[in-house]
Image: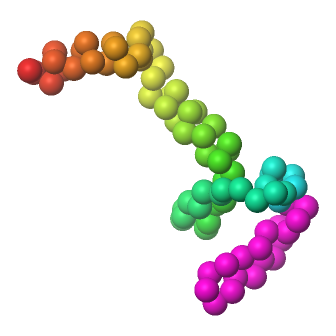
Amino acid sequence: MPSQVNITPNGRMSLPADLRKRMGLADGGTVFVEETDEGIILRTAAQAVARSQALAKRFAEGASDLSVDAFLARRPTESGE
């Protein structure tokens, strides 16, 4: 359900208490702001991490070893060093 939130002249806004509680922000916290063609998206830190992990997983599909050690071992060959 959409909520109206007012923004002060200095850019501050307050999220409704029930929304903060549902999102785990009742005691404050960090949100990440993303501008899209559709508008502005706010994500909690946990949501932003989960989204980043999902994006990384898409690019890692089919890779056999994604460890740092494996990356460093492949680096000279892939870079032509």
Chain part drawn in magenta: 1-19
Give the answer, above or below, for where 59 lies relative to 2: above
Q: Nearer the viewer, residue 30 or 32?
A: 30
**Residue for point 63% across, 37% down:** 50
- Dividing the picture into quadrants, the one containing residue 35 is bottom right
Q: Is residue 79 left or right of residue 13?
A: left
Looking at the rendered image, the quarter that the C terminus falls into is: top left
**Residue for point 27% across, 18% down:** 72
Give the answer, above or below, for where 19 lies relative to 78: below
**Residue for point 42% across, 9% down:** 64
Q: Residue 25: x and y, percent?
A: 79, 55
Q: Residue 39: x and y, percent?
A: 61, 67
Magenta stretch: dominant SS?
A: loop
**Residue for point 41% across, 16% down:** 67
Q: Residue 7: x and y, percent?
A: 70, 82
Q: Residue furthest bottom?
A: 9
Q: Is residue 16 magenta?
A: yes
Give the answer, above or below, for where 16 lies relative to 52: below
Q: Residue furthest right?
A: 18
- Dividing the picture into quadrants, the one containing residue 52 is top right
Give the answer, above or below, for where 67 lies relative to 16: above
Q: Residue 15: x and y, percent?
A: 79, 69
Q: Is residue 8 magenta?
A: yes
Looking at the rendered image, the quarter that the N terminus falls into is: bottom right
Q: Residue furthest left?
A: 81
All told, the count of numbered labels is 0
Q: Is residue 81 left or right of residue 72?
A: left
